[in-house]
Image (cartoon, rainbow, N blue to C red):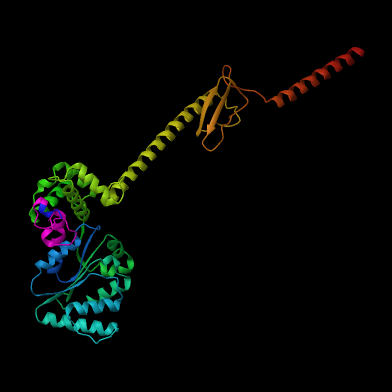
């Protein structure tokens, strides 16, 4: 819709994995080099992983364009299949005939082995590329490993390239798949684009489509990088929507307002940004701040409690208190009641020791009940002394 308005020959930000639009960032160069190295090796497995939308499929399409003519390639896009369905798909991709309606694993494996031996005799090689390999079940992975058992003294007869999300690495790290993991001759994890690479990426795609990088000023590039976290697919989606918005408004390029509005529309929420990863970073920041404030408050309260407790202990009159002041309690001296009071986070406001007097140095006083008891004892003693005096006088 906006191609003519901006002088473009094609839509520059399609999400289709067109190798012509592949921007060879440092990460994508490394990924392609690892795949090529694996193909030139002696067989086995090659592993390419990366987050969703980082360009793994596009790199594979670029690899297919560069394959030599002596390779027979089988490309599997939907690996969520059974062992029998996988073997049948491999046969279909490589043009291997098998009995119609066959569901025997042995029949499929025998036909594949015959094909691989014939391919080797002709001086050719066979390659199996599996997309979305994180969806492979354990049984299918084990069958793939068994397919690579067919080998000569020099090399294996089948090369397998597995492309998938980071979950694939976790699967292959399990002990029950260690035999397969040991056969991986090359592996690479493709990450997002850097902030500088995002600008080059957008400029490259616009150039391939016949446009100019001036459609996105440098200021919008920085914001675009923040909104998408450098994920190429998200960049494509957001840039396509931003160009459409600029066209509707009759602008010659995308400004900050248009990009921000496009991000809200793409995310499906007018009050949120596009990137889920951005949400996670914001949430992590809030959690860190809450933890820091809690630690500061606890440290401050504990320090005050420890200081007050040390003061109480210092004027303890030789340790006559009924218990050592608790360090997790916030203490203060109440001049109204002339008592030390404290509060603990697990307790209701409390009085630590009702028998502390606040005049002069802290001293321990007996409770009221003890005073009455002592007074009675004194009275009794006085009475006995009086009686004795009377008896003495009488005598």
Residue sitting farthest toward the right: 395
Is residue 247 placed above or below 187 in the rendered structure?
A: above
Above or below — where is 378 with respect to 241?
above
Residue 203, how many percent across, how many down?
11, 50
Residue segment shown in magenta: 5-33
248 on left or right of 282: left
Give percent across and percent down for residue 143. 28, 75
Considering every residue shown, the one lying at the far top of the view is 393
Quarter of the image where the C terminus is located: top right
Q: Quadrant of residue 30?
A: bottom left
- 136 shown above or below 195: below
Q: Of residues 186 and 5, which is closer to you in this image? A: 5
Is residue 25 shown in magenta?
Answer: yes
Q: Is residue 194 visible?
A: no
Look at 88% across and 14% down and name the residue there.
Answer: 390
Judge by depth and name the residue closer to the eye, 2 or 268: 2
From the viewer's side, name the closer residue of 34 and 246: 246
Report if residue 255 lies within the magenta region: no
Q: What is the x, y in percent for residue 117?
A: 16, 82
Quarter of the figure with the N terminus: bottom left
Asked whether 47 or 174 is in front, the reply is 47
């Amino acid at each position: 819709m906006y191609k003519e308005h901006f002088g473009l020959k094609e839509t520059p930000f399609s999400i289709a994995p067109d190798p012509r639009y592949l921007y060879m960032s440092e990460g994508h160069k490394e990924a392609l080099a690892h795949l090529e190295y694996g193909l030139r090796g002696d067989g086995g497995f090659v592993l390419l992983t990366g987050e969703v939308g980082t360009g793994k499929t596009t790199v594979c399409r670029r690899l297919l364009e560069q394959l030599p003519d002596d390779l027979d390639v089988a490309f599997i896009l939907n690996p969520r299949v059974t062992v029998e369905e996988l073997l049948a798909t491999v046969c279909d991709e490589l043009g291997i005939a098998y009995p119609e309606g066959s569901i025997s694993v042995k029949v499929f494996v025998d036909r594949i082995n015959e094909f691989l031996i014939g391919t080797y005799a002709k001086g050719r090689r066979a390659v199996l590329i599996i997309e979305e390999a994180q969806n492979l079940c354990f049984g299918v992975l084990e069958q793939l490993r068994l397919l690579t058992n067919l080998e000569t003294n020099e090399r294996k007869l089948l090369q397998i390239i597995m492309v998938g999300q980071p979950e694939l690495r976790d699967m292959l790290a399990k002990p029950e798949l260690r035999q397969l993991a040991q056969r991986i001759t090359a592996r690479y994890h493709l990450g997002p684009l850097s902030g500088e690479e995002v600008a080059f990426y957008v400029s490259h795609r616009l150039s391939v489509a016949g446009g100019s990088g001036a459609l996105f000023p440098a200021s919008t590039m920085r914001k675009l990088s923040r909104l998408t976290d450098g994920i190429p697919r998200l960049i494509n989606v957001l840039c396509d929507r931003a160009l459409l918005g600029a066209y509707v408004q009759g602008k010659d390029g995308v400004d900050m307002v248009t990009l921000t509005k496009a991000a809200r529309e793409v995310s499906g929420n007018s009050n949120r940004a596009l990137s889920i990863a951005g949400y996670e970073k914001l949430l992590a920041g809030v959690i860190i701040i809450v933890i820091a404030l809690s630690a500061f408050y606890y440290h401050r309260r504990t320090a005050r409690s420890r200081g007050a407790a040390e003061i109480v202990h210092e004027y303890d009159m030789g340790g006559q208190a009924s218990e050592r002041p608790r360090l997790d309690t916030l203490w203060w001296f109440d001049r109204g009641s002339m008592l030390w009071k404290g509060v603990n986070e697990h307790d209701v406001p409390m009085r630590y020791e009702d028998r502390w007097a606040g005049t002069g140095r802290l001293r321990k006083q007996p409770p009221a009940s003890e005073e009455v008891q002592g007074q009675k004892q004194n009275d009794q003693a006085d009475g006995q002394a009086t009686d004795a005096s009377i008896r003495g006088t009488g005598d």
